[in-house]
Image (spheres, rainbow, N blue to C red):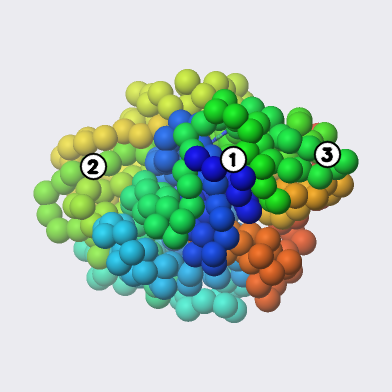
Amino acid sequence: MNQTADVIVVGAGVVGCSVAYYLASSGAKVALVEREAIGSGASAHATGSLSILGAEFSPGASFELALAGYRQFIDLVPSLESETGANLLYQRRASLRLALDEDEVVLIKAMMEWQQQSARIRWIDGDEVRRIEPRLSPDIRGAANEDESAQLDSYRLNLALAQGAERHGAEIALREVVGLLTHNNRVNGVQTTGGDISADMVVVATGEWSSVFGDWLGFPVPVRPLKGERLMLRYDGPPLPVLISSPMRGHMISRLDGLLSVGSTGGRDYDQTAMFATRESHVRPTEAAKLELLQRAIDVFPALQDAELVQQLAGSRPLSPDRLPILGPVPGWDGIMLATGHTTKGIHLGPITGRIISNWILQGQPDVDFDMNPFLPDRFADMTQADFQLSGQRVEE
Ligand SMILES: Cc1cc2nc3c(=O)[nH]c(=O)nc-3n(C[C@H](O)[C@H](O)[C@H](O)COP(=O)(O)OP(=O)(O)OC[C@H]3O[C@@H](n4cnc5c(N)ncnc54)[C@H](O)[C@@H]3O)c2cc1C
């Protein structure tokens, strides 16, 4: 491992590996530093849903970022698969956001009003939903039908991005970053358990573990882990032809490996203590989540009563106080950028984050045609820890 690089990327989840991939593809000398293993954080547990329909995106820059993030996969997947030989289990399909009661009808239609301005989404009634998939519940009242969305295996994506970055010359070091090398409000590199590494720029992509960098910099980097569980089921019968989600019952997606992913638990499923509990409890699957997720899935797709539970996954999301990613330079410091806090959308937004941060570093500005202000770290300069409680409760999927 070289002890100098142009850019050090800390954290090898989907976000860090995306940043490393785009930087290395553009010719930068990159050191990707990871303390455990590639894909050992949140990115290994994600559903891999790439849809703009959920409640996580809001009008304006958030939605623009989501659309750009979605489009980026269309080119990225074939090039990454051909560069690395990986199969990302990527599928592009229509999706349905289902309403099973009047509250959900109102909620979904309200969101459609602004979503329709940028994407092809229409309302269909319950009968039309069941014409698309006759096995769905007779209780479904209608759905937002998005022409196209996608899903892939997030762990495979994580590994392929790391491999792609390496093929373009990035060096991967399995060490923990334990401090920053600084001089006169400039970051010059990192201290690791395997020695110091110097660089012109450090990118913090450490997901839920990012706040320690804020402690070192004396600037808030407000990211906390928020627990999430999901299930993988096997059932008799053909796969679902569309990607399904609902505001109160989460997602239901037939993966290309034949398994059905259902979930996920979110803020509404845990009390405040469990929601922000220890790392150990976050990766521990619970009986309560299993029963709840199975019941929600059966409500939507009754035939799942006879399904086999193949796997239960538990992980956590890097929650930011407003659930938007934290992207860009740290006020008062040179030589450091944040790429963290992606909450429930770090897979969907990982590659676009990689491209934005790479361009920002190499060209001096992000190459997007929307306002980056809502994502800048300085929006949290005055925040208090209490802001997290509300934000966690709002995470529904
Ligand atoms: C149940 C569930 C379902 C989800 N479904 C979706 C979905 O369908 N779509 C979607 O877009 N997102 C989804 N998410 C959210 C998504 O998983 C996260 O937003 C995303 O994985 C965050 O990626 P990351 O690279 O920022 O963090 P991580 O993947 O957590 O990576 C951070 C890395 O940094 C490393 N690290 C930390 N500190 C240090 C240090 N000091 N030195 C070196 N390395 C360090 C860690 O070991 C880790 O490998 C889901 C999450 C969960 C839990």
Structural distance between the alpha carbons of marks 3 and 1: 18 Å
Query: Which one is nearer the viewer's eye here, 23 or 107?
Result: 23
The image position of residue 156, as x and y in percent, is 33, 50
Q: Amino acid at mark 1?
A: Gln
Residue 27 is left or right of residue 327, and the answer is left
Mark 3 lies on a secondary structure that is strand
Query: Which one is nearer the viewer's eye here, 356 or 318?
Result: 356
Q: Amino acid at mark 3?
A: His
Residue 139 is left or right of residue 99, and the answer is left
Picture disc at residue 233: 2
State whether residue 372 is above or below residue 369: above
Q: Mark 2 vs mark 3: which is more N-terminal?
A: 3
Residue with the mark numbered 1: 3
- Seen at 88% across and 41% down, the residue is 184
- Seen at 61% across and 45% down, the residue is 4
Query: Which one is nearer the viewer's eye here, 317 or 134?
Result: 317
Q: Residues within 10 Å of mark 3 (few under 14, many from 20)?
A: few
State whether residue 223 is above or below residue 375: above
Residue with the mark numbered 3: 183
Structural distance between the alpha carbons of marks 2 and 3: 53 Å
State whether residue 141 is above or below residue 47: below
Mark 1 lies on a secondary structure that is loop
- Seen at 42% across and 53% down, the residue is 166
Q: Residues within 10 Å of mark 2 (few under 14, many from 20)?
A: many
Query: Which one is nearer the viewer's eye here, 24 or 397?
Result: 24
Q: Amino acid at mark 2?
A: Leu
The answer, for residue 134, to whether it is visible in the render is yes
